[in-house]
Amino acid sequence: MIADPFVQLRLLDLQAVDTALTQLAHRRRSLPELLAIADAERRGAELHNELVDAETSIADLDREQRRLESDIDTVRLRADKDQARMTAAGVPAKEISGLQHEVASLARRQSTLEDELLELMERREIADTQLLVLRESTDRVAAERGSAEAARDVAFAEIDAAATERVAERLELAAALPTDLLALYDRVREASGGVGAAMLRQRRCEGCRLELAGNELAVVRAAKAEDVLRCENCRRILVRTHESGL
Ligand SMILES: [Zn+2]
């Protein structure tokens, strides 16, 4: 393939634009904010599960509290009824003795239930505090995620604006290149990790960093300026400049 040496030089400009585009894409993928967002998402999901557990525990405690309170009411009502019966006129002594027994037993039962209620309310207080802490953590993680997302969006906008400029430059450069040379460049770039054209600087291919010597150097030296050369080692298009050291 042959191409005007000045046209060949344009390949290096195109390569610079493509390299910049690759770097922008890499920067977009590896923004530290993306890790921060993923981390906040993970912690948010964990906290959500813990919140659901804490709320379930509190609902259980509330149900248990209502049951205890209802039991205490029942015991108290029964004791009141017994008391009333005992003070009524004409109750046989034997019944009074039975009622006194029952009242004493009800009082013990009530005391046990009230102890249980007290213990339950202490547990509820601890659960409330835990819930509060979880809600605060959830809010904090959501705020962290929000600011990371905002920072990501700023970085994305910056990167995308730079990429748009580069794409416009690429279109212009590509439009000025012969179709076959551009197709070769794109094919080599695709196959060679994003670098299709490399400068020959001081007899060294800047694509693979290998220095040309012997027969290869002789071939390059003998080539016409418009010959499109390829590096024997990495197969990239080798562009000669006044720095090529030939
Ligand atoms: Zn090379």
Image (cartoon, rainbow, N blue to C red):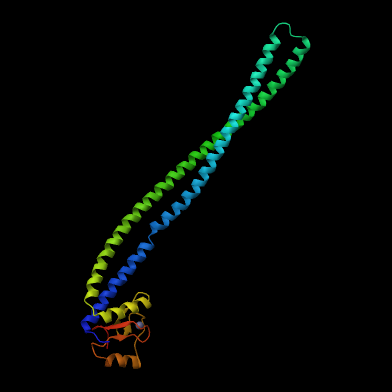
Image side of residue 158 versus residue 124, left or right: left
- Give residue 97's position: percent from left, percent from top: 76, 14
Please identify the quadrant where the N terminus is shown: bottom left
For residue 186, side relative to residue 77 (left or right): left
**Quadrant into which the C terminus falls:** bottom left
- The residue at 21%/81% (across/down) is 6
Residue 122, image quadrant: top right
Observer-nearest of 57 and 147: 57
Query: Where is residue 86 drawn, in percent x and y?
Result: 71, 11
Q: As drawn, is 234 to the left or to the right of 57?
A: left
The image shows residue 10 at horizontal and vertical percentages of 23, 78
Q: Residue furthest top?
A: 89
Residue situated in front as seen by the camera: 16 or 181:
181
**Residue positioned 76% across, 13% down in the render:** 95
User: Does residue 70 lie above or below 79 as drawn?
Assistant: below
Residue at the image point whose x is 66% and y is 24% from the top: 111
Classify residue 65 by image quadrant. Answer: top right
Quadrant in which ligand 1 is drawn: bottom left
Q: Is residue 198 above or below residue 159?
A: below
Please indicate whether residue 74 sits to the left or right of residue 227 in the image: right
Quadrant in which residue 102 is drawn: top right
Question: Measured along the vertical axis of the image, is residue 227 above or below residue 108?
Answer: below
